[in-house]
Every structure is written in structure tokens, then in C-alpha cells.
Image (cartoon, rainbow, N blue to C red):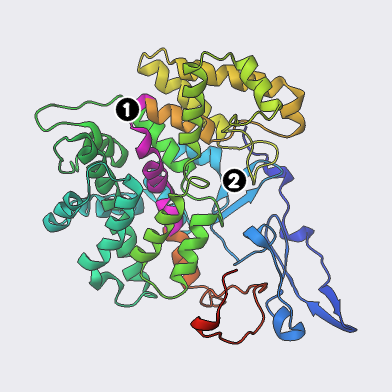
Amino acid sequence: MAESLGNAQTSNDFDRQPGILQVDGKTIQFPPVKATCGDQGIDVSKLRGETGLVALDPGFSTTASCTSKVTFIDGSKGVLRYRGYPIDQLANHSSFLEVAYLLIKGELPTSTQLDEFVRRVKRQRLLHEDFRAFFTAFPSNGHPMAILQGGIAGMATYYEDTFADVHDLELQEIQAVQLLAKVPTMISYIAKRAAGLPLLYPDNERSYVEDFIRLTFGLPYQSYDIDPAIIRALEVLFILHADHEQNCSTSTVRLVGSANANMYASIAAGVGALSGPLHGGANEAVLRMLINIRDSKLSIKDFVEKVKNKEQGVKLMGFGHRVYKNYDPRAAIVREQAHKVLERMGKNNDLFDLAMELEQVALSDDYFIERKLYPNVDFYTGLIYSAMGFPTKMFTPLFALGRLPGWISQYIEMLHDPMTRIGRPRQVYQGQPKRDYVPLRMREAK
């Protein structure tokens, strides 16, 4: 569903008085913080100094850790914008590297700027031969995200000159290009080693996404022609995942970077956060759910009843979203791409048929409508990756590749924000009060 720009809240709507808190007879005012769109803020950074209290917000669901100009989400209206541009416009008209330029630089490039940016990325896609051999040190069946995290962190040992000053914009741009160029090559090598197949060198005559597919699936003794519809589908998926505001992995990148850690170390930390199944593993879980339904020969109607009855071991995956409360704006775009991919590949995909049946049942059932359980982006992405031939273990590395521009742009923005301080959250301690040491001989088992 395309976004209507006419309903967007703007800064002109903002007229808020300072927040007021009364503690022990003392009144403290907290100044408002204006947003151009969406949730307005209140600056509570002086709460502890003024009152001796800290704000407890597990999961940071109502806490803004920063101000940002990168990505805007309005979950109640299903809005997602990169630097002000609606996601459906970018998915329909842009390329992944153009979106990367937009996120990192803040503006869409001219034709000349984009050509130069693409050339710079292509020139850096080769891995140092010693670094290439680095991947053979890991077990071939090791989890791809662990290997990718090690590889990205390891870039700091080969390109140490690129972060002599972490605040230098020119060096940051070099690091950004290095990451955008080399991470696809790394991921393809991880996939190839897991399959026991020979590694290929990048081909600069091909586009960014096209050559990533060739590196992942091609063989040295075969020509490898790829359907443009498949290339475009994967490019759209990368665009849809390019950034998503202050989520777990992005906040991790910012937190690590706040210590002035280099970009490689900070992005590697983001990969570690994304490897968690609650963050990056949702599309894998959807595929496993559909496989279980198929293999158990359970009808969709019976499965839905089990979900509604909350039967043990039965979970509905790929529906609803912590942020989007009405619909996920990326889901309709991915759904269309899923149809195109399966049609072009000539596959009668039984899992996709199950997914469509489940979608129709859920969208018409009051149980799901009342709880706002609608298909999200993860409901379809695993089906597309699987149809393209990617093993399930490679789904999250693909997510990481798509998210790379967002992590980079958030890291750079954080370092140049004058309000940035090293991250140091507080806590509400509920452990033992002071107690004296008891010698070992005098202790009794509890």
C-alpha cells in the first residue's frame, strides 16, 4: 500500500509545554524536543542529576536514545521512509547502491555521483588473498553469521589505515565503500564453502546484485546467466531491509561506536545482534512453520484453530509486528516479488500455496483482525530466498547485507552528533545490600 503524504504529522503540529515531574515536593521541568514527523520528545537527560532517580524502561519501548535524520517509521499508519522518501517509491524505482548512497550521504545522487559511487564499490570487491584464506580457517558447517561477524571484525586488521581518525568523513566514506564492496563477497564465500564448491572472483562487468548471485551459485567452468526478474527481486529485498530506525542491531552499532570503536568493529557487533533469533531469524521461523504444516499434513484451517486455542508448540510466525500496528508497508511489495520469482522460475511451490492460504484465512478471521495480526515482511522473504536456492542458514546473512547501509549511516550520524556521549545505561539495582565476607570454613550450605 502506497503511503499518503497528506496525512503526515509535521513540525507545525508541535506545540508542547515542558514535561513536569514532582518528586518529594520539588517540581522539575523537562524541555520538549521537536520532531519533524512522528513522536515528539521530552529531554530527561537531567532526571538523575535533578532528582536522584533513573527512568526504568525495559526494552526501551518508550525511550529515544538519540535524535536521527536517517529513517522515519509511523507504526500506526504503516509508514517507512528513508531520508524522507517513502519505501514503496524507492523499492519501485531505485537500486540498492543508490539507496545506500541516499542513506549514507543524506540525498539522492546525481547520475554522475551514482556512477562514481558504483565504480568505487566495484573496485574494492576483491578480498586480499590472505584474507580470502581466512575463511578456510572456520569449519565449513559453522553458522554463517558467526563467520560473517568474524570476517567483518577482521577487516580492521587489513585496513587499519582507514580508521586512523574515526571522526574523519573521508575515511568513513572509505570504510563504507570497503564494507559495501567486500561483505557480498564474504557472504558468497561462506555459502560456497558450506556447499563444498570452488570460490569465484568478482566480475566488475556485472551489477552489484547480479554478481553477488553469480558468486554464490556460479561455477568456474560454466557461464551463468541470471533472469533479470530474479536479480530485481533480490535487489528489492535488500532495499526493504536497508534500515529500520533504532532496532536491536542498529542500537548496538551506535552503542559500540559511541566508544569511538572503528566502523568494522561496530558493524560486526551489529551482525552479532542480528544473529539472535528474535531479531534476524524470523523468516527462517516462517519457513519452518510452513514445512511443519506441510509435513504433518495438517490443513490450514486446523492449524489456525490450534493457534487460536494456543496449543503448546504451535506458533504463528510472520504475522504482526512490534512497530507496525496496522500493516507492514514492506509486506505488499515483497508479496508481489514472491509471485514474480515463483512464476519466472516455473516452480509450483507447495509452501507458497500454503502461505497464501494461511494469509487469506488470517486476513478474514476476526481473531486475527482484532489482534492486528497481519502478514509482515518476514512472512514472504524466506519463501523467496528458498525459491532462489539459498539455504535456510543463509537467510540472516542476506538480511545483514541488506541492512549494511543503514548500519553505516547510523554509525556516521552518531559520531557527528554533538550530543553523542559514550553509551552508559543506568540500572535499578535489586540485589543484596552490603554484607560482610564470611570465611570459607564458617559457611553453611544454603
Does residue 408 appear in this view? Answer: yes
Looking at the rendering, the stretch of residues picked out in magenta corresponds to 387-407
What residue sits 71% from the left and 74% below the top? 44
What is the magenta segment's predominant secondary structure?
helix
Mark 1, residues whose alpha carbon is within 10 Å: few (<14), some, or many (≥20)? few
x, y (%) of residue 219?
A: 15, 31
Give the quadrant of the C terminus: bottom right
**Residue 229 placement (x, y as % from top left):** 37, 25
Position of the N terminus, as image quadrant, is top right
Q: Is residue 301 left or right of residue 396?
A: right
User: Residue 80 shows which numbered tag?
Assistant: 2
What amino acid is labelled 1 in the image? Gly
Which residue is identified by label 1?
A: 389
Viewer-side residue, 222 vs 383: 383
Amino acid found under the numbered disc labelled 2: Leu
- The foreground one among 108 and 273 is 273
Q: Is residue 340 magenta?
A: no
Mark 1, secondary structure of its residue: loop
Q: Residue at x 68, y 30 (%)?
A: 310
